[in-house]
Image (cartoon, rainbow, N blue to C red):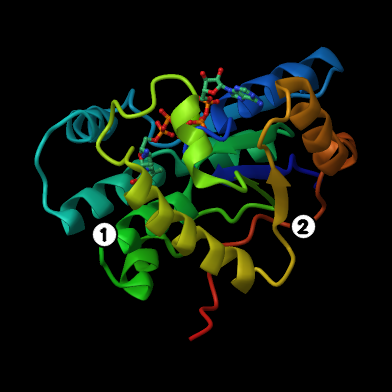
Amino acid sequence: MTRGPIILFEGLDRTGKSTQTESLVDALRRVGIGAELFRFPNRETGLGKMINAYLTGGSLNDETAHLLFSANRWECKDALVASSEAGNAVVIDRYIFSGVAYSAAKGLEREWCVSPDLGLPSPDIVIFFKFKDTAKATERGQYGEERYEKVEFQKLVRHEFEKFEEESSGSWNVVYVDDKPIAEVAEEVWQIVGSVCEKGIEDEIRPFQWEFKK
Ligand code: Z5A
Ligand code: MG
């Protein structure tokens, strides 16, 4: 059975993940390829509403917040699997790596952070958006309105993401977005995913696991 690829966009704040995931889904549909967008946190569900309250000023301890973000992914798992198996390209805006990067940046242990996400559907392709200069994020819309949007904290998050990038042993597709117009980033994304979306994937969806390098 051929299924649709699971394409994950991860990256630093305000690098354009939401812009590019929406634009990719539109572009795929325009050429007749089924596509569905999954965004995490999914603020529409009951758990997502709790996450939204937390991000906009609510209070939870770090472990509870972490598990809530993970549970928000698990509650969308069946829909995500069904969409891929129905032949759609599944485009994900943030996922497991965001979950671990933000919590580890707050001081939680990486292995502990990843454990509740083990077994979730694994992405087939990871695209990692980066600024060369982390402070670029502050120049983009609405920066600073939610709890993690502080430059010093973003540097810690970047460091955590880059550990994953290194551990991916070159399998992540890194896209630098500083000063690139939206259309140019979209073209780079298309070069990475266009042909896989046309052909589909023969293998079954793999359960997520991760090998940490000490
Ligand atoms: N979080 C967590 O702690 N644990 C988890 O498990 C998960 C998330 C999943 C909210 O996430 C917070 O939750 C986030 C991580 C944490 N914390 N922070 N900070 P979110 O995904 O809902 O956050 P968001 O509101 O979507 O922001 P974002 O993801 O950081 O932004 P983005 O999606 O990368 O960027 P954008 O919204 O597409 O673009 C931002 C602005 O830049 C906008 O005005 C665009 O028009 C503009 N833009 C986009 N591309 C360009 C280019 N190429 N040039 C110029 N301007 C551009
Ligand atoms: Mg976003």
Please provide percent x and percent y for residue 28. Answer: 78, 23
The residue type indicated by label 1 comes to: Lys
| Mark toward the viewer: 2 or 1 | 1
Please provide percent x and percent y for residue 5. Answer: 73, 43
Please provide percent x and percent y for residue 213. Answer: 53, 83
**Which residue bears the numbered disc 2?**
203
Density class for disc 2 (Cα within 10 Å; few <14, some 14-19, many ≥20) is few
Helix, strand or loop at label 1? It is loop
Q: Determine whether the beta carbon of the residue marked 1 sits less than 8 angstroms from the nearest atom of ligand 1.
A: no
The residue type indicated by label 2 comes to: Asp
Q: Earlier in the sequence, mark 2 or mark 1?
A: 1
Q: Is residue 98 left or right of residue 65?
A: right
At 90% from the left and 39% from the top, the residue drawn is: 195
Q: Is residue 99 left or right of residue 121?
A: left
Residue 118: quadrant of the picture: bottom left
Q: How many dots with numbers?
A: 2
Q: Is residue 118 above or below residue 27?
A: below
Q: Are marks 2 and 1 in contact (CB under 8 Å)?
A: no
Residue 146: quadrant of the picture: top left
Closest to the observer: 206 or 166?
A: 166
Q: Determine whether the beta carbon of the residue marked 2 sits less than 8 angstroms from the nearest atom of ligand 1.
A: no
State the separation of the CA atoms marked 2 and 1: 36 Å
Closest to the observer: 202 or 178?
A: 178
Q: Is residue 48 left or right of residue 164?
A: left
Helix, strand or loop at label 2? It is loop
At 66% from the left and 37% from the top, the residue drawn is: 178
Closest to the observer: 186 or 27?
A: 186
**Which residue bears the numbered disc 1?**
106
